[in-house]
């Protein structure tokens, strides 16, 4: 799917590929196997993102209202899944429990088309996200180290809920 590239930001253990189709649904590939997928429905005020596991079972439904960086995320349905334990999400945070939340921070964007970002826990980088925002179809690469794999599913769910059906 993607060309071999060298990344120096993290000691890479895993590379996850997220690809958009013509209907703006996203498909997540882990080791070249379908891992998650997402679809959306929208109206004038909000969009509803449905996230499915590799067996096409609905695991999460999120209603996203508002515009751009000030959007609100409301979880409408969540199947109990051992791989992630998300209490609350918004555009820039994943709240895992009362003591832990992952923060999404963009790289320098001042007068830039660079919309790459990273996830942090207690000021420590957990994962990098690289995307082809200005190309169609959208392609996103998630890079994560071995010691941070416990956060993999939560980060993927956050990316899917934030990026599926999004218009820039």
Image: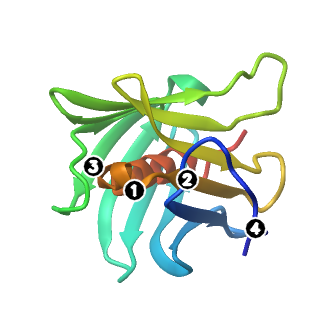
Q: Are marks 2 and 4 in contact (CB under 8 Å)?
A: no
Residue 28, image x, y percentages = 53, 68
Residue 82, image x, y percentages = 17, 62
Alpha carbon distance from label 2 to label 4: 13 Å
Q: What colour-coding does the image apply?
A: rainbow
Alpha carbon distance from label 1 to label 4: 20 Å
**29 or 61: nearer the eye?**
29
Q: Kindly identify which residue carries mark 2.
A: 143
Secondary structure under badge 4? loop
Which callout, 1 or 4, points at the residue further toward the start of the chain?
A: 4
Horizontally, residue 147 falls left or right of residue 83, namely right
Q: Kindly identify which residue carries mark 1.
A: 146
Horizontally, residue 3 falls left or right of residue 118, namely right
Which of the two discs, 1 and 3, sits closer to the camera? Answer: 1
Residue 35, image x, y percentages = 44, 74
Label for residue 76? 3
Residue 25 visible in the snapshot: no
Residue at x 56% of width, y 54% of height: 142
Disc 1 residue crowd, few under 14, some 14–19, many 20+, Cα 10 Å: few
Which of the two discs, 3 and 2, sits closer to the camera? Answer: 2
Alpha carbon distance from label 4 to label 3: 38 Å
Q: How many discs mark residues in the rendered view?
A: 4
Q: Is residue 73 above or below residue 29?
A: above
Which callout, 2 or 4, points at the residue further toward the start of the chain?
A: 4
Q: Kindly identify which residue carries mark 4.
A: 4
Residue at x 77% of width, y 33% of height: 114
Disc 4 residue crowd, few under 14, some 14–19, many 20+, Cα 10 Å: few
Alpha carbon distance from label 3 to label 2: 29 Å
């Amino acid at each position: 799917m993607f060309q071999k590239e060298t990344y120096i930001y993290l000691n890479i253990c895993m590379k996850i590929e997220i690809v958009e189709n013509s209907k703006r649904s996203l498909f997540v590939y882990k080791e070249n196997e379908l891992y998650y997928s997402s679809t959306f429905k929208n109206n004038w005020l909000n969009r509803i993102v449905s996230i499915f596991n590799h067996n096409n079972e609905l695991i999460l439904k999120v209603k996203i209202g508002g515009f751009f960086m000030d959007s609100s995320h409301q979880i409408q349905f969540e199947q109990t899944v051992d791989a992630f334990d998300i209490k609350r999400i918004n555009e820039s945070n994943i709240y895992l429990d009362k003591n832990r939340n992952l923060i999404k921070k963009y790289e320098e964007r001042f007068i830039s088309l660079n919309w790459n970002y990273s996830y942090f826990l207690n000021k420590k980088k957990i994962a990098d996200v690289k995307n082809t925002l200005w190309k169609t179809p959208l392609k996103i690469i998630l890079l994560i180290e071995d010691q941070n794999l416990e956060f993999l599913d939560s980060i993927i769910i956050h990316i899917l809920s934030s990026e599926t059906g999004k218009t820039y």
